[in-house]
Amino acid sequence: MTIDILTLFPGMFDGFVHESIIKRACERGIVDINIIDFRKYSKLSNNQVDDTPYGGGGGMVLMVEPIYDAIMDIKEKDSSAFVILMTPDGKPYKQKIALDLKLKKHLVFICGHYEGFDERIRTLCDLELSIGDYILTGGELPAMVISDSIIRLLDGVITNTSLDSESFDNNLLDYPTYTKPREFKGMKVPEILLSGDHAKIAEWRYEQQVEKTKRRRPDLMK
């Protein structure tokens, strides 16, 4: 998979690309992440990519032309590239969307910044996404969140067993897990997990998923 991220602040992605599981996925050639500073697509002498909004108002708005040129540059090399705009009024991001997007060969994320972006930028996008009902300073963090959630699903990134029975599978939260020691400050590992009876353990885990989801996220049960 190829992931292109259009941003004004490429340095924000240093840790994301060069640490932990994402780093290993890149080194193994499973994913190719390109951080693109779209200031280089500005046609102005000072590399300006934003301006004051028509009609007045506070803040600066990202201009459409640099974004358009950056997308066209990418599309010229790969017309199948799937373009995603990070925006607070986008579609709420869910695990089901991550599963759908992992099937794409080429994703492009547009990270907005400042007060907003020219409305015409929406016409360049295949999908608009939001990671929650709150406002951030830009789309960089959401792009990292979504990229991370997709990359970990790609074959060879993490073990298949780690992907089994995760939170949000079948709209249920994950079951509780334990490791050594068996007892810590009076808190004991449930006996069922020490029984060796895998069928009963699986049944217990499912029951725990249902109970936990009802208690913590009843909205998922709907």
Image: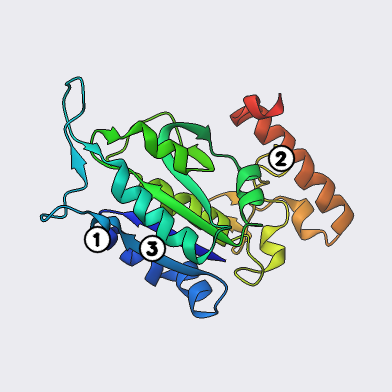
Horizontal relation, residue 85 to residue 218: left or right: left
Q: Amino acid at mark 1?
A: Lys
Badge 1 crowding class, 10 Å Cα cut-off, few under 14, some 14 to 19, many 20 or more, is some
Q: Secondary structure at mark 1?
A: helix
Q: Could you say which is closer to the camera, residue 141 or residue 186?
A: 141
The Cα–Cα distance between marks 1 and 2, rounded to whole angstroms, is 49 Å
How many marks can you see? 3
Badge 2 crowding class, 10 Å Cα cut-off, few under 14, some 14 to 19, many 20 or more, is many
Residue 23: image quadrant is bottom left
Residue 132: image location, x then y, percent: 45, 33
Image quarter where the N terminus lies is bottom right
Work out whether mark 3 precedes mark 1 in sequence or the reverse, and give the earlier one: 3
Residue 140 seen in the current view? no
The Cα–Cα distance between marks 3 and 2, rounded to whole angstroms, is 31 Å
Work out whether mark 3 precedes mark 2 in sequence or the reverse, and give the earlier one: 3
The answer to whether the residues at label 3 and label 2 have Cβ atoms under 8 Å apart is: no
Residue 209 numbered tag: 2
The residue indicated by pointer 3 is: 16
Q: Could you say which is closer to the camera, residue 196 or residue 74?
A: 74
Residue 40 numbered tag: 1
Residue 127: image location, x then y, percent: 53, 41
Q: Amino acid at mark 3?
A: Phe
Image quarter where the C terminus lies is top right
Residue 77: image location, x then y, percent: 49, 66
Q: Secondary structure at mark 3?
A: helix
Determine whether 170 is above or below 43 in the image.
above
Q: Could you say which is closer to the camera, residue 51 or residue 145?
A: 51
The Cα–Cα distance between marks 3 and 1, rounded to whole angstroms, is 22 Å
Q: Amino acid at mark 2?
A: Gln
- Residue at 52%, 56% in the rendered image: 107
